[in-house]
């Protein structure tokens, strides 16, 4: 009977040593793991994609493209994938960079300096480039319906609408006096 009494405490000590060693090995193996690269952590964070975020990026891209008069970017496929999110994020950034630089920006800013404030809402001309109703109806009908008169548009939106008129062949002639002051005519 004595061997049983000695054997039980020895087994208990052995089990405790093995449990402590395995716990120590697990802790040290976690500590020795190399850190994931930044790209891998970003991709891991994008495993669960919210389609509302992708839809927002897509809609902002399409809005900017329609403002600039560029054809819409087409992409098919579900919006809840990581690939779709990355695709629309790249397209939205590209559209924002392009929209921030209208082709005749210096000319529009010079005209604005002589015409009025960006939020000037006095009738019959609105906005910083003093657009009248027929001008807005002709060159920005959807924008006019969605946002109202030009005094409620951002400066970039006003410049892009004026750029649309410029591309249509009107040039700077809707602003004859101020365009002469700026040396555009």
Image (tube, rainbow, N blue to C red):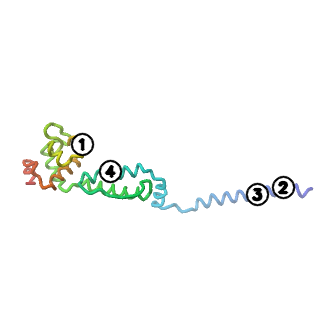
Residue extending farthest to the front is 76
Determine crowd level at label 3: few under 14, some 14-19, many 20+ residues with C-alpha closer than 10 A. few
Which mark lies nearer to you, 1 or 3? Answer: 1
The residue beneath circle 1 is: 145
Q: CA distance from mark 1 to mark 2?
A: 87 Å
Q: Secondary structure at mark 2?
A: helix
The residue beneath circle 2 is: 8
Q: CA distance from mark 2 to mark 4?
A: 72 Å
Instruction: Please give left or right for residue 65 compared with residue 20 in the image.
Output: left
Foreground residue, 153 or 14? 153
The residue beneath circle 3 is: 15
Q: CA distance from mark 4 to mark 1?
A: 18 Å
Determine crowd level at label 4: few under 14, some 14-19, many 20+ residues with C-alpha closer than 10 A. some
Q: Which mark is residue 19?
A: none
Q: CA distance from mark 1 to mark 3?
A: 78 Å
Instruction: Please give left or right for residue 38 compared with residue 75 in the image.
Output: right
Whether residue 42 is visible, yes or no, is yes
The residue beneath circle 4 is: 60
Foreground residue, 52 or 115? 52
Whichever of labels 1 and 3 marks the residue nearer the N terminus, that label is 3
Determine crowd level at label 1: few under 14, some 14-19, many 20+ residues with C-alpha closer than 10 A. few
Whichever of labels 2 and 3 marks the residue nearer the N terminus, that label is 2
Which mark lies nearer to you, 3 or 4? Answer: 4
Q: Secondary structure at mark 1?
A: helix
Whichever of labels 4 and 1 marks the residue nearer the N terminus, that label is 4
């Amino acid at each position: 009977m004595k061997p049983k009494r000695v054997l039980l405490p020895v087994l208990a000590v052995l089990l405790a040593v093995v449990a402590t060693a395995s716990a120590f090995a697990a802790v040290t193996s976690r500590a020795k793991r190399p850190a994931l690269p930044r790209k891998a952590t970003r991709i891991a964070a994008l495993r669960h994609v919210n389609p509302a975020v992708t839809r927002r990026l897509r809609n902002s891209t399409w809005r900017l493209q329609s403002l600039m008069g560029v054809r819409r970017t087409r992409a098919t496929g579900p919006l809840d994938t990581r690939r779709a999110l990355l695709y629309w994020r790249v397209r939205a950034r590209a559209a924002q960079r392009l929209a921030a630089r209208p082709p005749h920006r210096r000319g529009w800013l010079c005209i604005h300096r002589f015409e009025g404030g960006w939020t000037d809402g006095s009738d019959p001309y609105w906005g910083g480039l003093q657009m009248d109703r027929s001008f807005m109806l002709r060159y920005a009908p959807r924008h006019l319906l969605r946002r109202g008169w030009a005094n409620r548009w951002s400066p970039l939106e006003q410049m892009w609408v004026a750029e649309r008129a410029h591309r249509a062949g009107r040039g700077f002639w809707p602003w004859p006096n101020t365009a002469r002051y700026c040396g555009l005519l």
